[in-house]
Image (tube, rainbow, N blue to C red):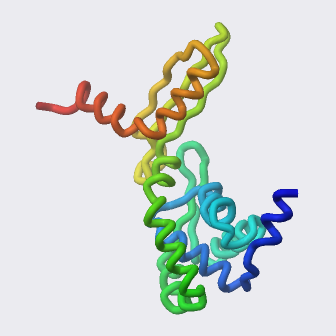
Amino acid sequence: MEQRKKEADLPICDPMTCKLIILFTLEKMEFPLTENTIFDIIYYRNNWMSYMDCKDYLYKLVDSNLVYKTENYDSEERFNITYDGRNCLNHFYSKIPLSLREHITEYTRANRMHFKRSQEYVSTFFKSEDGSYIVVLKIRSDTLQNEPIFEIKIKAPSRQSAIEACKKWQEQAHNAFESIYELLIEEN
């Protein structure tokens, strides 16, 4: 019921405007985004278009070579705007209503680092045979496609402590990496 209400409240945009919204968002974010991050920004958090429209138009943009997709070492696809996509956007961005362009610009500026961290600082956990939990913490890089720049596994005594470790990782990954790097690698 909530989903139907949310879909019904979405503004109706023509195919060209929807595609331009995706291109504009990718350009303003300034780094490749996962499919889920794109949906999170455009549909879940902002209702700029429906989920199905977003998915459909994203892949049409890929087919048109206005957006490219790459896979990283975990086979996770990331999308970014191409040179042709930027040219198209430069010619037609005024088709996006000014108020929406301003909102996209403000939103991406305010949330860019949050989304970058959520894609780069990855954490998972699983139950081990002894009943404890193994927490896997990674820092991914946009430039290193084949492997993470940092990965550590730790043993947590309970599911709740594994969940807490994953939550803390989102905020503390940079500090943890910096401390370990300085301790083990950096030359004085």
Number of numbered discs overlaid on the protein picture: 0
- Give the residue at the far left of this rendering: 188
Quarter of the image with the C terminus in it: top left
Q: Nearer the viewer, residue 126 or 142?
A: 126
Q: Residue at x 53, y 34 (%)?
A: 167
- Left or right: where 13 falls relative to 81: right
The picture places residue 149, in percent across and down from the top left corner, at: 40, 39
The picture places residue 1, in percent across and down from the top left corner, at: 88, 57
Q: Residue at x 64, y 24 (%)?
A: 126
Does residue 66 sit above or below 131 in this rendering? Answer: below
Dividing the picture into quadrants, the one containing residue 23 is bottom right
Does residue 25 sit above or below 186 in this rendering? Answer: below
Does residue 100 sit above or below 177 in this rendering? Answer: below
Q: Residue at x 80, y 67 (%)?
A: 7
Does residue 19 sit above or below 172 in this rendering? Answer: below
Q: Residue at x 57, y 63 (%)?
A: 79
The picture places residue 81, in percent across and down from the top left corner, at: 52, 72
The picture places residue 32, in percent across and down from the top left corner, at: 50, 61
Q: Nearer the viewer, residue 71 or 25?
A: 25
Dividing the picture into quadrants, the one containing residue 109 is bottom left
